[in-house]
Image (cartoon, rainbow, N blue to C red):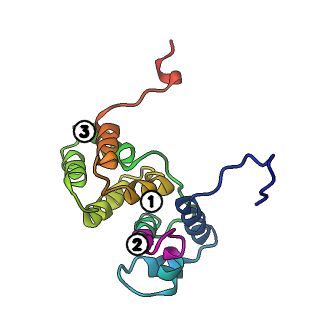
Amino acid sequence: MSTAPHDTRPEATPGVLLTGWLTGLVRSRDYGQLASLRRPGALTTSHILASSFAPTEADRELFERAAFLFAVYHRGAARPSYGFGTLGTAARRIGSPSARGPKDPGAARLMDRLVASRRIPWRHLQHAVERLRACDVPPPAWSQLVEDLSHWSDRSRPTHRTWARDFHTRSYNKKETSA
């Protein structure tokens, strides 16, 4: 990347770089590395590569586990999904056609468990990703998920609040609201 003064491209964040590597595994059909990432706690080349995107030593486990969640969602996938929005936005799409998000009791309980936790709720995150996959709905933006989880322990709990707000509040865009 050029560092010339006229270069206005934003620097890629570690989460964006991790997402790029992971989506490359899906596009190249490297199912071996993706399967390896689905073995949490294993010390494999895939885990080491995923953790190498972490900006600090303290973030290495977070990057490995985010890669695990990505691999769970993309099990057997032929095309990668970059996702969009926060996990709250994605969880809003969990459920049946008759009741999704806050109207689906299971999705509401899952979101309550996620945002109530002081530590990163990895088991509940895995369950949320598995539910998204089972409902055949897009995941959260993987780079955003990494960013959100890196701020999980912040005193003001911004991630918790954002996810809960995105889950319980329907977002509107101009296209939907203009008559």
Which corner quadrant of the image does residue 171 belong to? top left
Q: Helix or strand or loop: what does disc 3 sit on? A: helix
**Where residue 179 appears, x then y in whole percent?**
50, 12
**Where residue 152 appears, x then y in whole percent?**
33, 56
Q: Which mark is residue 129?
A: none
Which corner quadrant of the image does residue 123 belong to? bottom left
* Mark 2 → mark 3, Cα distance in angstroms: 34 Å
Q: Residue at x 43, y 55 (%)?
A: 145
Which corner quadrant of the image does residue 65 belong to? bottom left
Instruction: From this view, report whether residue 86 is shown above or below residue 174.
Output: below
Q: Which mark is residue 146?
A: 1
* Mark 1 → mark 2, Cα distance in angstroms: 13 Å
**What quarter of the picture does the N terminus occupy?**
bottom right
Principal SS element in the magenta part? Answer: helix
Which residue corresponds to mark 3?
Answer: 102
Relative side of 82 to 99, left or right: right
Give the camera-side residue of 106 and 52: 52
Relative side of 142 to 123, left or right: right
Relative side of 179 to 125, left or right: right
Is the Cβ of the residue at disc 2 closer than 8 Å to that at disc 3? no
Which residue corresponds to mark 2?
Answer: 58
- Would you say residue 55 sits in the magenta stretch? yes
Q: Residue at x 52, y 60 (%)?
A: 15
Q: Residue at x 55, y 68 (%)?
A: 22
- Would you say residue 58 sits in the magenta stretch? yes
Is the Cβ of the residue at disc 1 closer than 8 Å to that at disc 2? no
* Mark 3 → mark 1, Cα distance in angstroms: 24 Å
Q: Helix or strand or loop: what does disc 2 sit on? A: helix
